[in-house]
């Protein structure tokens, strides 16, 4: 019902990363992985050689001498004998050598093995890292190929939307279900009444529209609501009816007019208009009463409805007018109405006025926050007020 | 006429900047290689030092100089290796600084080039219009 409510952004993933780029990145990372693998293999080879050497050095001192083929130059070998089997000249690196016994040599080699292992370990970790990276890139590429959309919404915005857009619909459902139950219970007599109310509502809506077109004459506008409230009260006199009207209103708003009769269609449009205006106007007003959030809300909305199309500068005026009118309506309503809901709604306006007076001057910026709490309850309060208003 | 002159100047400027940039990039690559080499050497030297520390006092230590093994004092070898490590670490630091420096230069050159290119394009666009 409020299409312009979107505050988030929708970006096709493709506009952020081209598929080609993602693939390139993936292949680059794959390349890195291959390099690392090679390095690891090399290290692993060292480790193997080292192991062999260790076993050899361990075996050497077992005999006093070994018969071996001694390499002579590059190609030639001659038979020889390995003596001093317990003595090794160990290369330490950096061209340093040292004489060691076999046992000591094995220790050296073991230490070397340890460092090699730790290196292999770190390379493995790197490879893992690269692999996750590669899979991420590949995923991104495929997602881009699939035309994935990235939808971003700010948290607050989301809540707001929920409050103003999605919640009311559930609310409608609930209420309508409740309503239907009541309807069946109360019989078909109500249907007539209901139809009558709807037509009345229609009338009022038309009136309202006209007024809007006339340029808002506030006193008129306020009068009509009052009257309508009175009428409604007389006609319905109890909760069921207010709820019914609520339902119709909401349904119109949300655009499901399935369960409601035809007459409402025309209203639907009007309603929708009114509601459209709400979000924009609301911010200014809502800001004034963070503390009174719940009760006042209906009032606010009503207010906005009336001043819909109104210009912000007029707000102050409207407020005053509104206060007056609502006072009137209060009186009338209280005289004629019995239902607890009505009383509630009346009381709310009162509280609101006070806060209102206190706050009219100050306009606070963070309206959205305010709106959320208000928006959340609305399904009922709003509708009540609506009913009252008519 | 003057605009075409300016254009030529700009192009020449751009070319020289591109050359500079290429040079700097080469330097960076070189430094990176050097750095890699030094890190490997440092690792090796540390290993040697560890082993030397583990040797007993009277162990024979030799250093391979050319084709001959020269017997060295353990303490001397130890000191040599330490010095070598110090030197390598200093070199590493120097190379790191030079890499950073070069990268900064590279970035500034790149920006300058971007600006030049934009100016060139705008001039060309203006010419096309005229």
Image (cartoon, coloured by chain):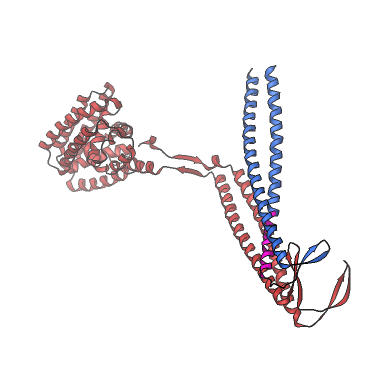
Q: Residue furthest left?
A: A335
Figure quadrant of residue B129 = top right
Q: What is the quadrant of the N terminus of chain B in the image?
A: top right
Q: Is residue A304 visible?
A: yes
Q: Is residue A359 left or right of residue B29?
A: left
Instruction: Examine the rendered structure and indicate whether residue B125 appears above or below residue A297.
Output: above
Looking at the picture, tell me which residue is in the foreground, A81 or A17.
Answer: A81
Looking at the picture, tell me which residue is in the foreground, B129 or B28.
Answer: B28
Q: Is residue B121 left or right of residue A338?
A: right
The tally of labels here is 0
Residue displayed at 64% across by 62% down:
A119
Q: Residue A183's spot in the image, x, y percent?
A: 20, 45
Looking at the picture, tell me which residue is in the foreground, A234 or B41.
Answer: B41
Q: What is the quadrant of the C terminus of chain B in the image?
A: top right
Q: Is residue A262 visible?
A: no
For the stretch drawn in magenta, the main secondary structure is helix
- Magenta segment range? B38-58
Figure quadrant of residue A216 = top left
Q: Chain B drawn in what color?
A: blue
Chain identifier, red in the render: A
């Amino acid at each position: 019902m409020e299409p312009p409510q979107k505050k988030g952004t929708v970006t096709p993933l493709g506009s952020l990363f081209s598929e080609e780029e993602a693939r390139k990145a993936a292949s680059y990372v794959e390349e890195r992985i291959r390099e690392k693998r090679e390095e690891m293999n090399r290290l692993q080879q060292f480790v193997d050689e080292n192991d062999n050497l260790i076993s050899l050095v361990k075996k050497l001192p077992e005999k006093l001498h070994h018969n071996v083929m001694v390499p002579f130059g590059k190609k030639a070998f001659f038979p020889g004998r390995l003596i001093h089997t317990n003595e090794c000249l160990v290369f330490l690196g950096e061209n340093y050598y040292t004489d060691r016994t076999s046992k000591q040599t094995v220790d050296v080699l073991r230490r070397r093995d340890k460092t090699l292992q730790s290196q292999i370990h770190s390379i493995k970790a790197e490879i893992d890292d690269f692999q996750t990276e590669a899979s991420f890139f590949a995923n991104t590429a495929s997602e881009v190929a699939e035309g994935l959309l990235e939808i971003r919404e700010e948290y607050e915005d989301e809540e707001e939307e929920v409050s103003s857009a999605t919640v009311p619909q559930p609310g409608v459902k609930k209420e309508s279900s409740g309503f239907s139950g009541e309807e069946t219970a109360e019989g078909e007599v109500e249907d007539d009444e209901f139809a009558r109310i709807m037509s009345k509502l229609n009338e009022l809506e038309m009136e309202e529209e006209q007024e809007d077109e006339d340029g808002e004459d506030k006193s008129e506008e306020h009068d009509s609501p009052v009257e309508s409230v009175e009428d409604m009260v007389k006609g319905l006199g109890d909760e069921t009816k207010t709820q019914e009207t609520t339902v119709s209103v909401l349904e119109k708003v949300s655009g499901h007019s399935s369960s409601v009769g035809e007459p409402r269609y025309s209203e639907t449009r009007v309603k929708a208009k009114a509601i459209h205006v709400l979000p924009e106007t609301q911010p200014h007003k809502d800001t004034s009463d963070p503390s009174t959030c719940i009760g006042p809300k209906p009032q606010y909305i009503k207010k906005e409805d009336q001043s819909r199309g109104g210009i912000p500068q007029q707000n102050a005026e409207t407020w005053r007018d509104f206060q007056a009118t609502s006072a009137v309506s209060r009186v009338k309503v209280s005289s004629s109405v019995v239902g607890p809901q009505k009383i509630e709604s009346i009381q709310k306006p009162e509280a609101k006025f006070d806060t209102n007076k206190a706050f009219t001057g100050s306009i606070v910026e963070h309206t959205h926050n305010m709106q959320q709490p208000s928006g959340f309850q609305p399904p009922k309060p709003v509708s009540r007020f609506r009913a009252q208003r008519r | 006429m003057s605009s075409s002159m300016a254009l030529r100047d700009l192009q020449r400027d751009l070319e020289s900047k591109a050359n500079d940039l290429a040079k700097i990039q080469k330097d960076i690559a070189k430094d990176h290689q050097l750095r890699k080499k030094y890190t490997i050497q440092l690792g090796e030297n540390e290993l040697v030092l560890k082993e030397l520390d583990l040797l007993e006092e009277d162990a024979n230590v030799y250093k391979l100089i050319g084709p001959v093994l020269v017997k060295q004092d353990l303490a001397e070898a130890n000191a040599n290796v330490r010095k070598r490590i110090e030197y390598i670490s200093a070199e590493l630091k120097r190379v790191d600084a030079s890499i950073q420096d070069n990268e900064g230069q590279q970035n500034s050159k790149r920006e300058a080039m971007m600006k030049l290119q934009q100016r060139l394009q705008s001039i060309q666009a203006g010419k096309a219009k005229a």
